[in-house]
Amino acid sequence: MTTSLEPAPATLREVDLAVSGMTCASCVARVERKLGKIPGVEAVVNLPLESAHVVLTQQVDDADLLAAVESAGYSARVTGTHVPYSGPSGAGDGAGAGEDDARDGLRTRLLVAAALTVPVLVLSMVPGIELPGQEWIVAALALPVVTWAAWPFHAAAARAARHGTSTMDTLVSIGVTAATLWSLWSVVRGDTMGMYFEVGAVVTTFLLAGRYAEHRSRRRAGDALRSLLELGAKDAERVAVAADGTPVRRPDGAWSTTSVPVSELHVGDVFVVRPGSTVATDGEVLEGTSAVDTSLVTGEPVPVDVAPGDTVVGGTINTSGHLLVRATRVGAQTTLARIGALVTQAQTGKAPVARLADRISAVFVPVVLVLAAGTLVAWLLAGAGSDAAFTAAVAVLIIACPCALGLATPTAILVGTGRGAQLGILIRGPEILERTRAVDTVVLDKTGTVTEGRMALERVVPAAGEDADEALRYAAAVEALSEHPVARAVAAAAQVGAAGDEAVELGADGVAKGSLQVSAFVATPGGGVEGVVRRSHDGLGSGLGLNARRVAVGRLAWLGDRGVTVPTTVNDAVAKAEDTGATTVVVAWDGTARAVLELRDPVKATSAQAVAELRDLGLRPVLLTGDGEGAAREAARAVGIAESDVVARVLPDAKAAAVGRLQQAGRTVAMVGDGVNDAAALATADLGLAMGTGTDVAIEASDITLVRGDLRSAATAVRLSRTTLRVIKQNLFWAFAYNVAAIPLAAAGLLNPMIAGAAMAASSVLVVANSLRLRRIA
């Protein structure tokens, strides 16, 4: 699958459809097959989003597309028509609305089923409870559950039957119907020992609960794109422009601005970006300098300094200066919108994985039906009465009722995901477990995943004869007045160092005696800060001007431009630090550079152990980052990743492409990330794991969420997923084997329906007990 952001030829038209009624992988295959039969149509159907993305290479009416979907047994509606990557078409919203309706309907059925099943279970299973006409009461309570509440399963089974296939819904429908019909027949005959109403009611209620949870998960999958687009600015301060294209100022010298929705911006419009606000759209800086937080796009923790002529990206944050920007891309052409297109493309192109139970039921159901019919015919031909023949045939159906088979997957998922939640790991469903089993490569984002995701002072390198602690104190005094992230890291480091100092004495004005006071503060965006620093001796601030120093802190080149003398040792220290990817600032006073402050995004304390655990699971770790090569190599060395497995300086589309290249090389790839810039790669990977401390977009685009933000949780998630999948397979095997072993006994008349029901219940207990073992995973 390509991850290019370049638009396809203009002759192509794309149509988004919301498709209702799909429940499994076979549904997806039928819809794709029907759409694919139309000449000039290429369709990819997405089960979690309940949508279809159709590319038309010939002229095709929307009505023909809808008719094709309806001929497959499902309903559809057009939610958008557009050219490739022309932006969100509304499909997400439309599909989401339909999904909400389906989820609400399931919730109502589940609540009613649960309320009626409890008394059915008590009256049927608790000894000693005898009510007049109890069998009719149980029948009256159970019938709404096995008919109205179970209708989604019956309808899906009928739909599959019309197309000559069978699914898990077929098993549920047949089992519930067989148990109910036999129970009604027993009630009519007055045989209360042959009632199995609780079987149908319990199976229906439990599977409705699983289906409802699945629909909630699907709705969350559709939220990724909506969350991504919400990160952008909602309004912009558009500047009035004169006829000659010159921005207009008011009489007081300020720009003449009007607040407008971002959607009303056009290419060429000029807008203002104030300190702390979000850049409205992609553009070019016309006036002003600032540091822009671009971590949304690049993932790098260090803000990028911008000046006139530089480009800015919509959705990034202006941290300090006041900018005048001309829009160069708007709407669907912006970087943020194109990342959204990548996420959608990756999610849609991810082939759904067929449920294990569906694959078994595709063979199992027809065999059971043939066996039941064969049993009935054989008994009749043998001269037995119709009652005995029908009893044996129904016993075959009941012993084959998919209680255990139906519980095999949802019970293990329930226990496994519940244990995962206790461990801070959220797993979305059985498809994720299948992908986890096959993963052999894990791609790790650096910033916020392997590292803390914020700048911190690593060390101070003083020039010859200078004191490192003194240099840090003077630098922090000036930097404390700046809002730049690097300045905040320096100031924070000085506070940490001073935390153990003895209590200070305060002067009359509340200022600590001996503290450093700053006046005449000046900040140069993109360069550094400076100010006059005095030591307060009696708390009167700058009133006593002893030991005053003009201190400058900033980039080495900026200090050089100001005539500051830079010793060779300082030059060497800066070059050496930046070679390893560190960010450096230099502190100077009295016209001489005194020390180098090295800052770095520190590696998390647990990351090295996490990488070792991933290796123990047979996974090859790869570091993928938007940071420079020096920082990437340093982080990889710290956690034990080979330098050959480091990919640096990659933007969001390149991240997705890098994952794609690994997949093309035959690797099954898991991606661990935390930012918007990771969303496309998370969606492209065979398995996406998002750090819970990251952005909502990354979390929604992933398959597994690591709530605690600890990379060790990734290894735990893989272990838990693999173990849960193994338990599901064990459950399916035993449920299937149990029925296969008992069906011949039922067909031979050795099991009446009552014993068959007890055997069926025993198989369910076995499946549940096996699933509960997952609670012991650490």
Image (spheres, helix red, strand yellow):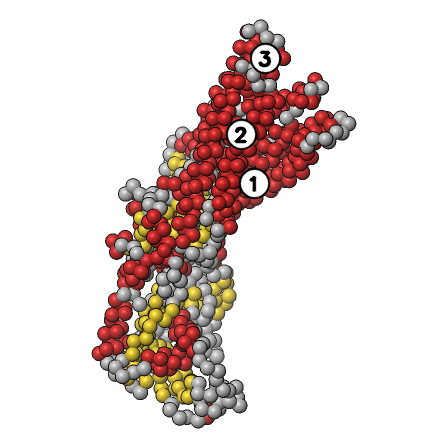
As drawn, 714 above or below 452: above
**Badge 3 amino acid:** Ala
Measured Cα–Cα span from mark 2 to mark 3: 25 Å
- Residue 314 in the image: state x and y as whole percent: 41, 61
- Residue 496 in the image: state x and y as whole percent: 43, 74
As drawn, 536 above or below 166: below
**Badge 2 amino acid:** Ser
Compare residues 363 and 163 and report the one nearer the observer: 363
Compare residues 76 and 127 and report the one nearer the observer: 127
Measured Cα–Cα span from mark 3 to mark 1: 39 Å
- Residue 268 in the image: state x and y as whole percent: 39, 62
Nearest-to-viewer mark from 2 and 3: 2
> Does label 2 or label 3 sit earlier along the sequence?
3
Asked whether residue 30 appears in the rendered view, the answer is: no
Q: Dot 1 corresponds to which residue?
A: 212
Q: Dot 2 corresponds to which residue?
A: 763
- Residue 756 in the image: state x and y as whole percent: 58, 23
Asked whether residue 296 appears in the rendered view, the answer is: yes
Query: Residue at (48%, 56%) from the top-left corner?
Result: 230
Nearest-to-viewer mark from 3 and 1: 3
Q: Dot 3 corresponds to which residue?
A: 389
Query: Residue at (23%, 77%) from the top-left corner?
Result: 569
Compare residues 645 and 36 and report the one nearer the observer: 645
User: What quarter of the picture does the N terminus occupy?
Assistant: top left
**Badge 1 amino acid:** Tyr
> Does label 3 or label 1 sit earlier along the sequence?
1
Measured Cα–Cα span from mark 1 to mark 2: 24 Å
